[in-house]
Image (tube, helix red, strand yellow):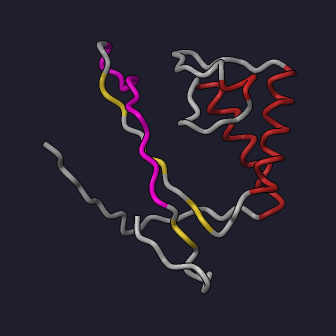
């Protein structure tokens, strides 16, 4: 049995990050993902990726981990195409305490291209 559900987000906006702030923004998101124990399948660096796993209390980073994340963010920023995005959807199930801490596997959308890019087709999520 397979169900296919569609949902639209009529007022969804995407925050624009200037090219000079991409590395900083990536670093902030990678640090937060590491602290909370999940990276949604995004590879940061082998030294960091092996430590992934959800945590109840945010973990602290040591100097080496901060350096590795900063370097990974800078490298990814150089290769990133800023005219295309993907959305990631993450759902949580209730746990025995009544909180929503049981994370399901995230679902990543197809690429969504900037509609001002005339050489690329406009895609729907």
**11 displayed left or right of 118:** left
At horizontal 80% and vertical 24% (from top left) the residue drawn is 65
- Spot occupied by residue 31 in the image (x, y as percentages of width and height): 70, 33
At horizontal 57% and vertical 61% (from top left) the residue drawn is 85
At horizontal 45% and vertical 55% (from top left) the residue drawn is 109
Q: Is residue 104 found inside the magenta-colored segment of the image?
A: yes
Towards the viewer: 52 or 14: 52
Name above or below for residue 37 compared with residue 92: above
**42 displayed left or right of 90:** right
For the N terminus, the image quarter is top left
Q: Is residue 68 found inside the magenta-colored segment of the image?
A: no
- The residue at the far front in this view is 1
For the C terminus, the image quarter is bottom left
- Spot occupied by residue 18 in the image (x, y as percentages of width and height): 76, 64
Towards the viewer: 121 or 96: 121
At horizontal 42% and vertical 45% (from top left) the residue drawn is 107
- Spot occupied by residue 113 in the image (x, y as percentages of width and height): 55, 71
> Which range of residues does the magenta coloring cover?
97-110
Towards the viewer: 39 or 4: 4
- Spot occupied by residue 17 in the image (x, y as percentages of width and height): 71, 61
Name above or below for residue 20 compared with residue 89: below
Q: Residue 106, located in which quarter of the rendered image?
A: top left
**118 displayed left or right of 68:** left
Name above or below for residue 109 compared with residue 9: above
């Amino acid at each position: 049995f397979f169900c296919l559900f569609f949902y639209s987000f009529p007022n969804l906006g995407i925050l624009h990050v200037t090219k000079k702030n991409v590395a900083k923004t990536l670093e902030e998101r990678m640090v937060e993902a590491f602290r909370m124990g999940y990276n949604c399948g995004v590879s940061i660096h082998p030294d960091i990726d092996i430590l992934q796993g959800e945590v109840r209390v945010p973990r602290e980073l040591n100097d080496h981990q901060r350096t590795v994340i900063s370097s990974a963010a800078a490298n990814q920023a150089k290769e990133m195409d800023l005219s295309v995005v993907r959305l990631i959807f993450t759902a949580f199930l209730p746990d025995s305490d009544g909180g929503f801490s049981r994370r399901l596997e995230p679902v990543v959308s197809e690429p969504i291209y900037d509609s001002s890019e005339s050489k690329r087709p406009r895609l729907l999520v």
